[in-house]
C-alpha cells in the first residue's frame, strides 16, 4: 500500500515534466506582429514526400508575401506540424494549433483520414480548414461552412475525362486498377456512374490494391486475359510509374489512361518512358507558361534549385496565396467568420487557373486532357 | 494461358518471398531474434547500392555484393552493441525483439534525414525488361532475383549441413548451453548469423527495389511478407522458408486472379491461421522452446 | 488499507480538478489520449504481462471496438452505455474467434499471428464499404450521451467532459485490472507464466485461463475504441495501423509489465513524448526511437522497475 503515494508522486512528476516540455516546444518567443497560420502535413511516414511538396510550395509563397511587406504590415508565420499520416496525430496537432497557438485557420492535411478527423474538430470550433490535397467527396458534403478545398473532387474531374474516354477513345470495355483509398474509391465510383449514363465503356474489372503495394502482377495478369480496350490506372505518380512499367513487361495492349495525380515530373522520371502514349487529365504541368505559372516556377526554383517534382508544390503555393488574399481583404481583427466570408469571395488567378469556391467550398477547375509524349505532357486536342 | 501465367507469376513471386524470408528465419533460428528491423536492413541495403552506383559509378552486380557486405557489417555491429547485451541479461527472446522494434523507427528516421522523403530509382540492367517464353511474360529482373534466391537457398543449406561452421550454427540453434559446453563461441556464431541475415535482407532490397521505388518506408511490406512466409513454413527452418514462400506466392496469385484481389495481402495471413490450426509449429518447423 | 483509500481520494480530486488547472484544451486532449491509451495498455498487459506471450495485434480489438461503438452510436444516437458495452462484447467475441486458433501457439508465433489478424481486420474495414465506409471512414459519429427514458441527461461536448468520461473508464479498468492481479485468477495466470506444465498438472486448464485473460484484454481495448470513436467523431481503417500495435506493446514494456501501474506510466510516456519532441522537427522520431532503445537497454523491467530498483538501492545505502 505504501506504493500508492509514491506511484501518484511519480505519475505527477512525469506529467509535470512532460507538460513543461510540451509547452516549451510550442510557444517560444511571442512575436506580436505576425499572423499565425497552422499547417498540418505528413513530414514523416509513407506520405512524407507529398507532405514535403505541399509545405515547400506554401513556404515559397509565404516568403514572397512576407518579402513584399506581409499582410497589412504583418508577417505570415507558418506553424508546420507533422501528423505522420495518422488521424490521431493530426487531431493532436490540430488541438495544439487551435488551443495552444490560437490560430483561426489551418491548412491541411494530406491523407483524407487525417483531414476528416481534423474537420470534426474545426467544424465544432469554427476554425477555417483549407485542404490542399484531400479529395474525399464527403469533406465538402457535411455542411461545414468553414471548409475549403484547393483541389478538384473526383466527380468534377471525371466529368470531362469520361466524355473523352467514351467519345474520343470510343472505348467499349474498361478495367480499373485503383488504390484502395479515397482517391481510388471516389474516382472509380464517379467514373462508373458517368460511363453508365453515356452507355460506354463497360467496366469489366475493378481491382483495388494496397496503397503500399509494389507488385501488381496478379491484377495485371487477370486484366490481360480480359483484354479491355482501356486500362484506367488510378494512382499517385509513384505507383502509377510502377504499374506502367509492369504493364509493359506483361505486354498488355490496352490503351492506358491515368488519374490526374500522375501528371507530374516525378511520373516521367520514375516511369522511364513506360508511360508513353498514356492519357492523363492535367490541370497543371511544369510546361505551362502563363504568367502565374511562370511566377510560381521562378520562385520555386529560386528557393529549392529544382523544378517541382509533383503538383503538390503548386497546390501548396496556391493554397497559401488564396488564403493570404482572403486575409488581406479582412477588415479589422482576424476572426474565423470574417476569414470564411472572404474565402467565399475568392477570385484569384493561379497557375491552375481562376480560383473561386462554390457553396460547399469546392473549387471550379478547368482540366485539360494530356498525352505522355517523350518527356512531356502534350495537351490532346 | 491465364493459368500458366498465373502459375509462373506465383512461383516467381514465391521465390522472391523466399529471399525476403531467408534472413529472417536464420536470425530467428540461430540468433533467437525476431528481427523487426529486417525491412529496414532491406531498405538500407538498397540505399547502399544506390550510393555505390550513383557516386562510385560501379556496375549493378558489384553494388549488389557491396550492399550485402556493408549491411552485413552494420548488422554485426548492431548485434554486438545492442542485441547481445540485452540477450545476455535475460534468456527471453523478447528483449532483443524490442530492440529491433526501436531500431525500426531509428533506421527509418535516419534514412529520412539522410535521403529525404522523395522516391529514388535504383537502376538495374535487368529492370523492366520483358522475358517471354511460350506466351508467358516475366521480367528479367524478377528472374534474376529468382536465380539469386535459389542460389542463396542452396548455399545456405550446404553451409548448414556440410560445413563445420554450419554444424556449430545448428548446435547453437538446438541448444545454446550444450553448444557452449562443447566449446563453441556462441557470440561469434551469433554475429556470423546476424551478418548473414542482414546481408541477405540487403540483397533482397537490391534485387526487388529496381522494380519499385526506393524511399525510407519500403521496409514495411518486405517485413510483413517475410514474416508471413517464415511463420507459414516454420520459424528457423530454411526448407520451411522455401516451401512457405512458394505456397504464399502461388496462393496470392491464384487467390487474387480467381477469387478476389481485394484481400490479396490478407491471403498469406489467412493461410497462416489455417495452417497453424493444424500445425502450430508451421509446415515443417520443429517445436520451438517456450520464449 | 486506509492509506490506499487516501491515495485514491487524492487521485480522484486531482482528476476532477485537472480541467481547471489545465486550461489549455490541447493539454487536456493529451490527458484524454493518455486515458484511452491506458485502457489499451492495461488490456494488453493482462495478456502480455500475465500470460507471458506478447500480442502484436492488440489494435485489432481497439479497431473492432471503434467500429462497433461507432455503428451502435449511429443507431442509438450515441448512448454511451450501449456503445461501450456493445463494443466490449463485440471485441470480446472477436477475440474468442481468433483466440481459439491463436492461443494454442506460443512465443513468436502468437505475436506474429495476432499481428496478421490485425492486418486482416484492416483489409476488412477497407473493403466492406457498405458497413464501414471503406477507406473513406465514418465521419460524424454522435458524441457520448447518457440517455435515460428517452431524454439525454449528460452529453460529452468538449474536452472537459471527455476527460471525465475517459478518466472514469480508465480508472474503472485499472481497478478491475488490479483486482484480477490480486485475486486467485491473477495468481493462476502468474503460475501459468512461470510454469506451464505445473499448472497443467494441478488440474487448471491453461487454455481456458489464457482465453479468459485474452477476452478481458480485448474487451478493455473495445471500450477504449468506442470512447475514441465518440471523442474524435471520425474513424477509418487507420485505427488498425501497425504502428498502433507497436505503440501499445511499447507502452506496456516501457512502463513495466505485470503490474497495473506500469502500463499507465507507459501510456503517459508514449503519448506525451512524441508531442513533447515536436520542437526537434525532422529529428523528432529519431530521438523518440533512441529514447525507447535506451529504456529497453538500461531498464529491462520498464520505468517502474527502474524506480523500484533505484529506491531499494538508495535505501540500502542509507541503512
Image (cartoon, rainbow, N blue to C red):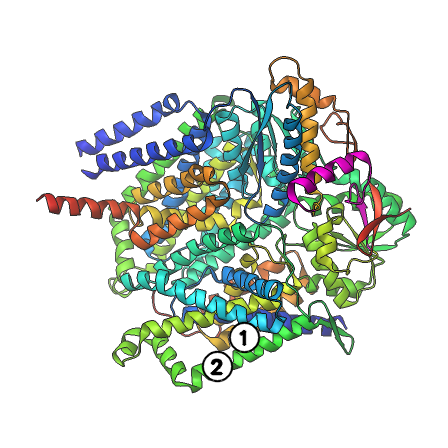
Specify the label residue B157 is tagged with.
2
The answer to which image quadrant residue A90 occupies is top right
Q: Label 1, on which residue?
A: B243
Camera-side mark, 1 or 2: 2
Q: Residue furthest bottom?
A: B162
Q: Which residues are magenta?
A: A278-306
Between the residue at mark 1 and the residue at mark 2, the CA separation in whole angstroms equals: 14 Å
Q: Is C102 left, or right, of A83 in this rendering?
A: left
Residue C268 locus on image (x, y percent)? 37, 39
**Circle 1 residues within 10 Å: few <14, some 14–19, many ≥20:** many
- Tell me the subunit letter for badge 1: B
Residue A53 locus on image (x, y percent)? 64, 43
Q: Is A83 left, or right, of C213 in this rendering?
A: right
> Measured along the vertical axis of the image, is residue A143 above or below residue B237?
above
Q: Toward the viewer: C48 or B23?
A: B23
Of the image marks 1 and 2, the number of the one nearer the N terminus: 2
Amino acid at each position: 500500500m505504501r506504493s500508492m503515494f509514491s506511484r501518484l508522486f511519480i505519475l505527477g512528476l512525469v506529467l509535470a515534466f512532460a507538460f513543461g516540455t510540451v509547452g516549451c516546444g510550442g510557444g517560444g518567443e511571442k512575436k506580436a506582429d505576425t499572423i499565425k497560420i497552422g499547417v498540418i502535413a505528413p513530414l514523416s511516414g509513407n506520405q512524407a514526400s507529398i507532405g514535403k511538396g505541399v509545405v515547400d510550395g506554401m513556404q515559397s509563397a509565404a516568403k514572397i508575401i512576407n518579402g513584399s511587406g506581409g499582410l497589412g504590415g504583418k508577417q505570415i508565420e507558418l506553424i508546420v506540424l507533422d501528423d505522420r499520416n495518422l488521424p490521431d496525430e493530426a487531431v493532436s496537432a490540430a488541438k495544439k494549433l487551435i488551443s495552444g497557438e490560437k490560430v483561426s485557420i489551418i491548412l491541411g492535411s494530406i491523407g483524407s483520414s487525417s483531414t476528416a478527423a481534423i474537420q470534426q474538430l474545426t467544424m465544432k470550433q469554427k476554425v477555417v480548414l483549407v485542404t490542399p490535397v484531400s479529395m474525399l467527396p464527403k469533406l465538402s458534403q457535411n455542411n461545414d461552412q468553414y471548409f475549403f478545398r484547393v483541389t478538384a473532387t473526383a466527380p468534377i474531374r471525371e466529368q470531362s475525362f469520361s466524355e473523352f474516354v467514351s467519345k474520343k477513345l470510343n472505348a467499349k470495355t474498361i478495367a480499373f486498377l485503383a488504390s484502395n483509398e479515397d482517391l481510388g474509391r471516389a474516382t472509380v465510383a464517379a467514373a462508373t456512374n458517368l460511363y453508365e449514363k453515356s452507355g460506354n465503356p463497360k467496366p469489366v474489372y475493378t481491382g483495388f490494391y494496397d496503397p503500399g503495394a509494389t507488385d501488381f502482377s496478379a491484377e495485371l495478369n487477370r486484366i490481360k486475359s480480359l483484354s479491355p480496350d482501356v486500362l484506367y490506372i488510378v494512382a499517385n505518380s509513384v505507383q502509377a510509374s510502377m504499374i506502367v512499367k509492369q504493364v509493359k513487361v506483361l505486354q498488355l495492349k490496352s490503351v492506358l489512361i491515368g488519374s490526374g495525380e500522375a501528371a507530374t515530373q516525378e511520373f516521367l522520371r520514375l516511369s522511364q518512358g513506360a508511360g508513353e502514349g498514356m492519357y492523363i487529365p492535367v490541370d497543371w504541368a511544369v510546361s505551362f507558361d502563363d504568367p502565374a505559372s511562370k511566377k510560381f516556377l521562378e520562385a520555386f526554383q529560386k528557393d529549392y534549385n529544382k523544378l517541382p517534382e509533383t503538383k503538390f508544390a503548386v497546390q501548396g503555393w496556391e493554397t497559401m496565396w488564396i488564403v493570404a488574399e482572403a486575409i488581406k481583404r479582412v477588415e479589422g481583427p482576424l476572426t474565423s467568420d470574417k476569414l470564411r466570408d472572404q474565402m467565399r469571395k475568392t477570385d484569384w488567378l493561379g497557375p491552375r487557373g481562376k480560383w473561386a469556391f462554390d457553396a460547399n467550398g469546392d473549387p471550379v477547375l478547368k482540366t485539360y486532357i494530356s498525352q505522355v509524349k517523350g518527356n512531356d505532357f502534350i495537351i490532346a486536342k | 494461358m491465364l493459368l500458366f501465367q498465373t502459375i509462373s507469376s506465383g512461383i516467381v513471386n514465391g521465390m522472391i518471398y523466399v529471399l525476403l524470408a531467408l534472413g529472417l528465419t536464420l536470425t530467428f533460428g540461430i540468433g533467437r531474434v525476431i528481427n523487426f528491423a529486417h525491412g529496414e536492413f532491406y531498405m538500407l541495403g538498397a540505399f547502399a547500392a544506390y550510393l555505390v552506383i550513383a557516386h562510385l559509378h560501379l556496375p549493378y552486380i558489384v553494388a549488389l555484393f557491396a550492399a550485402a557486405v556493408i549491411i552485413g557489417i552494420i548488422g554485426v555491429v548492431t548485434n554486438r552493441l545492442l542485441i547481445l547485451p540485452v540477450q545476455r541479461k535475460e534468456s527471453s527472446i523478447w528483449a532483443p525483439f524490442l530492440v529491433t522494434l526501436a531500431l525500426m523507427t531509428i533506421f527509418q528516421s535516419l534514412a529520412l534525414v539522410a535521403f529525404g522523403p522523395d522516391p529514388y530509382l535504383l537502376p538495374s540492367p535487368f529492370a523492366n525488361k520483358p522475358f517471354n517464353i511460350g506466351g508467358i511474360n516475366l521480367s528479367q529482373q524478377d528472374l534474376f532475383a529468382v536465380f539469386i534466391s535459389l542460389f542463396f537457398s542452396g548455399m545456405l543449406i550446404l553451409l548448414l549441413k556440410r560445413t563445420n561452421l554450419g554444424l556449430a550454427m545448428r548446435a547453437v540453434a538446438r541448444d545454446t548451453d550444450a553448444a557452449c559446453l562443447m566449446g563453441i563461441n556462441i557470440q561469434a556464431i551469433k554475429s556470423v548469423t546476424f551478418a548473414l541475415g542482414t546481408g541477405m535482407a540487403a540483397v533482397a532490397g537490391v534485387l526487388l527495389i529496381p522494380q519499385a521505388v526506393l524511399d525510407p518506408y519500403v521496409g514495411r511490406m518486405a517485413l510483413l511478407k517475410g514474416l508471413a512466409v517464415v511463420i507459414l513454413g516454420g520459424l528457423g527452418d530454411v526448407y520451411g522458408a522455401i516451401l512457405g514462400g512458394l505456397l504464399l506466392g502461388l496462393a496470392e496469385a491464384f487467390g487474387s486472379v480467381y477469387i478476389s484481389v481485394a484481400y490479396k495481402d490478407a491471403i498469406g495471413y489467412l493461410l497462416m491461421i489455417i495452417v497453424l490450426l493444424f500445425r502450430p509449429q508451421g509446415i515443417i518447423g520443429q517445436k520451438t522452446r517456450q520464449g | 488499507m486506509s492509506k490506499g483509500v487516501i491515495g485514491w481520494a487524492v487521485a480522484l480530486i486531482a482528476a476532477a480538478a485537472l480541467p481547471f488547472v489545465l486550461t489549455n484544451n490541447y493539454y487536456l486532449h493529451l490527458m484524454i489520449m493518455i486515458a484511452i491509451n491506458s485502457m489499451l495498455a492495461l488490456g494488453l498487459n493482462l495478456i502480455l504481462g500475465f500470460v507471458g506471450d506478447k500480442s502484436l495485434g492488440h489494435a485489432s480489438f481497439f479497431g473492432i471496438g471503434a467500429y462497433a461503438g461507432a455503428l451502435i452510436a449511429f443507431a442509438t444516437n450515441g448512448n454511451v452505455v450501449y456503445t461501450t458495452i456493445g463494443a466490449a462484447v463485440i471485441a470480446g467475441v472477436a477475440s474468442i474467434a481468433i483466440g481459439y486458433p491463436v492461443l494454442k501457439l506460443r512465443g513468436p508465433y502468437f505475436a506474429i499471428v495476432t499481428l496478421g489478424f490485425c492486418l486482416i481486420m484492416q483489409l476488412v474495414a477497407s473493403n466492406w464499404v457498405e458497413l464501414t465506409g471503406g477507406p473513406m471512414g465514418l465521419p460524424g459519429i454522435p458524441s457520448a450521451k447518457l440517455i435515460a427514458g428517452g431524454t439525454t441527461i449528460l452529453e460529452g461536448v468538449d474536452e472537459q467532459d471527455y476527460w471525465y468520461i475517459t478518466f472514469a473508464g480508465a480508472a474503472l479498468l485499472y481497478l478491475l485490472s488490479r483486482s484480477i492481479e490480486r485475486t486467485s485468477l491473477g495468481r493462476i495466470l502468474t503460475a501459468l507464466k512461470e510454469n506451464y506444465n505445473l499448472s497443467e498438472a494441478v488440474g487448471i486448464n491453461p487454455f481456458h485461463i489464457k482465453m479468459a485473460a485474452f477476452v478481458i484484454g480485448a474487451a478493455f481495448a473495445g471500450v477504449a475504441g468506442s470512447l475514441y470513436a465518440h471523442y474524435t467523431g471520425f474513424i477509418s481503417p487507420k485505427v488498425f495501423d501497425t504502428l498502433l500495435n507497436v505503440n501499445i506493446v511499447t507502452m506496456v514494456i516501457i512502463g513495466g509489465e505485470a503490474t497495473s501501474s506500469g502500463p499507465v506510466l507507459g501510456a503517459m510516456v508514449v503519448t506525451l513524448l512524441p508531442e513533447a519532441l515536436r520542437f526537434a522537427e525532422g529529428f523528432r522520431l529519431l530521438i523518440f526511437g533512441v529514447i525507447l532503445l535506451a529504456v529497453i537497454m538500461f531498464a529491462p523491467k520498464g520505468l517502474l522497475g527502474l524506480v523500484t530498483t533505484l529506491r531499494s538501492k538508495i535505501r540500502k545505502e542509507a541503512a
